[in-house]
Image (cartoon, rainbow, N blue to C red):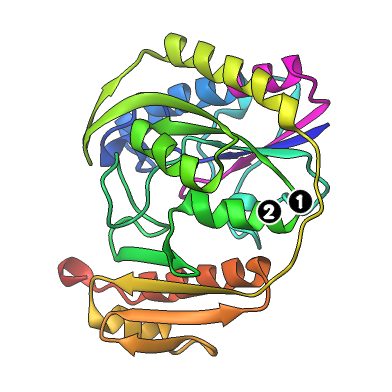
């Protein structure tokens, strides 16, 4: 049984503030340890549930956050940026299940450090007409490859969101959202127990199913008109409103690659304090 952990950081135990996940800050160094603790708890649970191979795919920012020297020695880690499928790199290599660890809600809704790919320039993303978090986008990609989502961890609103796109996945709320930058948090020793148990139990659903390829449409709304105009330079991307673009793709894999390009172009068009 081969399992992948897609490990983001905003939804990790204790994280509530931008500095907690911003590479190079003192707070980031502190929360790297809690992030690694969450990952190790998940790895332990997966192996206890019958996993024979666990690949941890770093999915946050620089994608160099987890402390390799402290990682459970039974796991392997994919670290570093510029991966074709980004947060889901490896899902197309015969995985029997995936865990969304440290996830968060999407842009434009309540949730601790809520966003979709870009930290603040995107105000909403829609997949086939449905408001989409990173979790929803990644679950659709996993489904295309026949890979079930076994566990989702993050704040309580992230778990609620997961119920709409992966209702059979085991949710683990490691904190309760108060605002985008505040939460009622549980100590990492407590959350580790919950994550390990959910991961062990979640393995009961591990096993590939028949995936199916179909067309998808993604729409993205930005907080400024020039970002939409910049993204619309990409072939197949249409600017159909002042701050909104959309594109169609023949598969979810291609849709996510295109979405990655759109966000990269928009990010590069941000100018100083005015965005």
Q: Give the residues in magenta.
A: 41-62
Disc 1 packing (10 Å; few <14; some 14–19; many ≥20)? many
Q: Is residue 127 left or right of residue 95?
A: left
Q: Position of residue 71 (x, y in %)?
A: 63, 23
Q: Nearer the viewer, residue 115 or 25?
A: 115
Q: Is residue 72 visible?
A: yes
Disc 2 packing (10 Å; few <14; some 14–19; many ≥20)? some
Q: Position of residue 86 (x, y in %)?
A: 59, 56
Mark 1 vs 2: CB contact within 8 A? yes
| Secondary structure at numbered mark 2 | helix
Pointer 2: what residue?
Answer: 143
Residue 25 shows which numbered tag? none
- The stretch drawn in magenta includes residue 268: no
**Residue at point 77%, 54% (across, down):** 92
User: Which corner quadrant holds the C terminus?
Assistant: bottom left
Q: Is residue 97 left or right of residue 14?
A: right
Pointer 1: what residue?
Answer: 146
Q: Position of residue 16 (x, y in %)?
A: 28, 33
Q: Position of residue 6 (x, y in %)?
A: 59, 41
**Residue at point 54%, 20% (across, down):** 195
């Amino acid at each position: 049984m081969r399992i992948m952990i897609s490990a983001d950081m905003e939804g990790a135990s204790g994280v509530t503030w931008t500095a907690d996940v911003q590479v190079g800050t003192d707070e980031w160094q502190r929360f790297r340890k809690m992030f690694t603790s969450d990952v190790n708890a998940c790895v332990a649970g997966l192996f206890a549930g019958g996993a024979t191979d666990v690949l941890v795919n770093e999915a946050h920012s620089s994608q160099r956050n987890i402390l390799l020297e402290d990682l459970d020695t039974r796991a392997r880690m994919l670290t570093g940026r510029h991966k074709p499928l980004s947060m889901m790199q490896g899902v197309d290599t015969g995985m029997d299940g995936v865990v969304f660890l440290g996830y968060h809600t999407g842009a434009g809704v309540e949730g601790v450090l809520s966003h979709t790919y870009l930290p603040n320039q995107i105000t909403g993303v829609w997949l086939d007409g449905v408001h989409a978090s990173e979790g929803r986008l990644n679950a659709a990609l996993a489904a295309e490859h026949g890979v079930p989502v076994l566990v989702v961890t993050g704040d309580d609103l992230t778990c609620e969101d997961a119920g709409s796109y992966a209702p059979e996945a085991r949710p683990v709320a490691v904190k309760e959202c108060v605002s985008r930058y505040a939460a009622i948090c549980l100590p990492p020793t407590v959350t580790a127990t919950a994550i390990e148990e959910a991961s062990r139990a979640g393995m009961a659903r591990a096993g590939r199913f028949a995936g199916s390829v179909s067309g998808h449409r993604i729409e993205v709304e930005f907080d400024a008109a020039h970002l939409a105009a910049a993204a619309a330079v990409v072939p197949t991307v249409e600017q159909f409103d002042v701050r909104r673009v959309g594109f169609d793709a023949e598969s979810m894999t291609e849709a996510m690659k295109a979405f990655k390009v759109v966000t990269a172009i928009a990010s590069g068009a941000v100018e100083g304090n005015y965005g």
